Amino acid sequence: MIVAQKKPIEEIIDEIKGFKRILIAGCNECVTVCEAGGKKEVQVLASALRMYFMNNGVEMTIDEITLERQCDHEYLEELRDRIDQYDAVLSLACGAGVQFLAEKYRTTPVFPGVNTSFIGVTEQRGIWSERCQGCGQCILGQTAGICPISRCAKRLLNGPCGGSTKGKCEIDKELDCAWQLIIDRLKELGRLEDYEKIIPVKDWSTERAGGPRKITREDVII
Amino acid sequence: MRIQYPGNIRIIRVPCTGKVDLIHILRAFEKGADGVYLVGCLEGDCRFDSGNLRAKARVRQAADILERIGIGGERVRMFNLSSGEGPRFAEFATEMTEAIRALGPNPIKAARKAA
C-alpha cells in the first residue's frame, strides 16, 4: 500500500486558516490502513480543528466526508454536488488523491493533510516500512524476493557493498542490509548459486528518472 | 460501601476501556467537558488482553492533540484499579476533580458563549 503520515496539526491549521468553510476528505484505501487519512482520522482532525478555531474565536465550518478512493473518477464524483459549499478542501488522501481531486474541481483550493511517504508494508500496527519504489522493471525473481532497489541504500544490483556489517547497513545500525537478507534467503531456498549470477545494468528509463510515467492498456480501454 | 465521591462526574459505562476511541474523548471536550478520565482494569489484568493498554495509548493521543490545540493535555487521564477497589475509584474521582478545578473550565465553553 501507499504509506502516508499525518501532517502536524499546526501545519494544517496554517494551511486552512483564512477560509470559512472547509471540507475534510478522507480516503478509504491505503491511508486508512496506515491510520493517516481514513474515516477515523478525518473525525479526529475535524474535531480538533473545530475546537482550535472555536477556542481562538474564529468562526469556521468544518465538515467531513470519506470517499472510497480519491484516485478514481467515480468516487470523486460524489463531491460534485457539495464541493461548491466549501472554500477549500483538506484531503487526507495520498498525493495521487489530492492531485486528482484538484484536477477535477478546478475552482476549489485543495490542501494536503498527510505527507505521502512510500509504498510499503505494515510490519506491525504502528510500524510501516518501505518495500517498493515502482521502478517499472521488477527484479524480485532474481533477488530471492527481496528488493535491493527499495531496501539497499545504494540500490546495488550486485551487493553487498563494504558498508555491510553484521547484517546491518552502514547508514543506520537498525537498518538491515538488503543484500545480507538476499543471501540469507537464497541460502534458505537452497539457491545460493543464483548469487553468482551477475545482474546486468538496469534500464532506469522505466523508473521516475525517465520522467513522469503513464501506462496505456489498449486491451482494457473500452 | 456507600463511599462518597464528587457529584460533578458523569459516568459513562463501557464494556472495556478498549472500547473508548480517541474521537469519543475529543467529542466530550468539543461538547464542553472540563476533563475526561478513563478508569480501567490494572495493566496485565485485562480480560480482553490489551483493552486497557489500547485505552492508555488513546489517552496519550488525546492529551497530545489537546495540548497542541490549546485546550490542555492534562485534562485527560487514565487510571487503573481492580474491580474490588471501590475506595480507589472514589480517590481517583476526587483527585481528578481537584486537578481539573485547579485548571479551570474548558476554554471551549467560554469561547462558545462569546460566539
Image (cartoon, coloured by chain):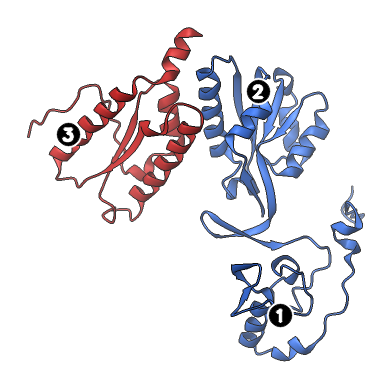
Chain colours: A blue, B red
Dot 3 lies on which element? Answer: helix
Camera-side residue of A72 and A149: A149
Q: Residues within 10 Å of mark 2 (few under 14, many from 20)?
A: few
Q: Which residue is mark 2?
A: A17
Q: Which residue is mark 1?
A: A162
- On the image, the x and y values in percent for residue B64 come to 46, 38
Q: Is residue A18 above or below residue A13?
A: above
- On the image, the x and y values in percent for residue A19 come to 68, 19
Badge nearest the viewer, 2 or 1: 1
Report the side of A214 relative to B15 (left or right).
Answer: right
Q: Which residue is mark 3?
A: B90
Give the spatial CA distance, label 1 vs label 3.
63 Å
Give the spatial CA distance, label 2 vs label 3.
43 Å
Dot 2 lies on which element? Answer: loop
On the question of residue A33 being in view, the answer is yes
Give the spatial CA distance, label 2 vs label 1.
51 Å
